[in-house]
Image (cartoon, helix red, strand yellow):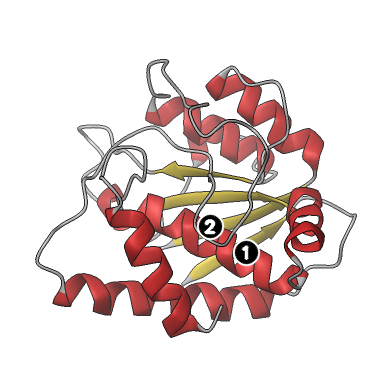
Amino acid sequence: MIEIVNRQRRRKINARQWRVFADEAMLTLGRSQQSATISPRYRSGFCKSTALPHIRRQSHNHNDRNRQSPATPQDQREAVACLCGRSDADTWQEPTKRDDSIVFVADEAIKKLNRQFRGKNYATDALSFPSEPEAFEVDQQKHLGEVVISVQRAAAQARDNGVSFSNEVKQLILHGLLHLSGYDHETDKGQMNRLELKLRKQLRI
């Protein structure tokens, strides 16, 4: 079950629409992984979405990547808990199934996260926060993490790319879910990009 969290007021968000799509994307990804012979690398930290073939993301250099130590699970947990309106990060309730969260925010919020965790003082389109369990959190491997999306960046990129807002957001959700599943286009020699293009065709985006 995908949790949809809306923390902005600039655009109306249809939670059911994005939940249905994210569930479909995870099912499609799962089928692809079952038939694949190469497993993704699972990693901690998170990554900004970057340019892919036929998709113009932001104009920031592709080499603009996080070279700092990855955020700790507690750091990520507190940041996203605050963003999602949870009053106390220490009372975080982990899902009982393999759940994820898609969080829609404004530029100001994603810029703050980008600055806090990556040292980059600008708004990006999306950030992925893979869940990295502590040693005592035996059940957290069932929770992949969170994808945070700026609706303003998504709208601007949709206009620039000549696609609908819905299509752009679907691409960002898919990209983020791939990161949560362990793929990393900065280190995998094109594996994630190839898979993403394949999944886009299957999902008709």
Extreme-right residue of the structure: 10
Q: Which residue is mark 1?
A: 4
Where is residue 141 drawn, in percent x and y?
Answer: 26, 51
In the figure, is residue 141 to the left or right of 162? left
- Amino acid type at circle 2 is Ser
What residue sits 49% from the left and 35% below the top?
77
Vertical order, 142 against 23 (above or below): above
Residue 189 versus residue 24 in the image, above or below: above
Q: Nearer the viewer, residue 105 or 205?
A: 205
Asked if residue 190 is positioned above or below residue 46 in the image, the reply reads below
**Residue 80 or 121: which is nearer the viewer?**
121
Residue name at image x 78 percent, y 57 percent: 160
Quadrant showing the C terminus = bottom right
Mark 1: give few (<14), some (14-19) or many (20+) Cα within 10 Å. Answer: many
Q: Is residue 173 above or below residue 86?
A: below
Q: Are marks 2 and 1 in contact (CB under 8 Å)?
A: yes
Instruction: Give the number of the disc on residue 101.
Output: 2
Instruction: Decide which of tag 2 and tag 1 comes sooner along the chain.
Output: 1
Taking the image as drawn, is residue 144 in sight? no
Image quadrant where residue 86 sits: top right
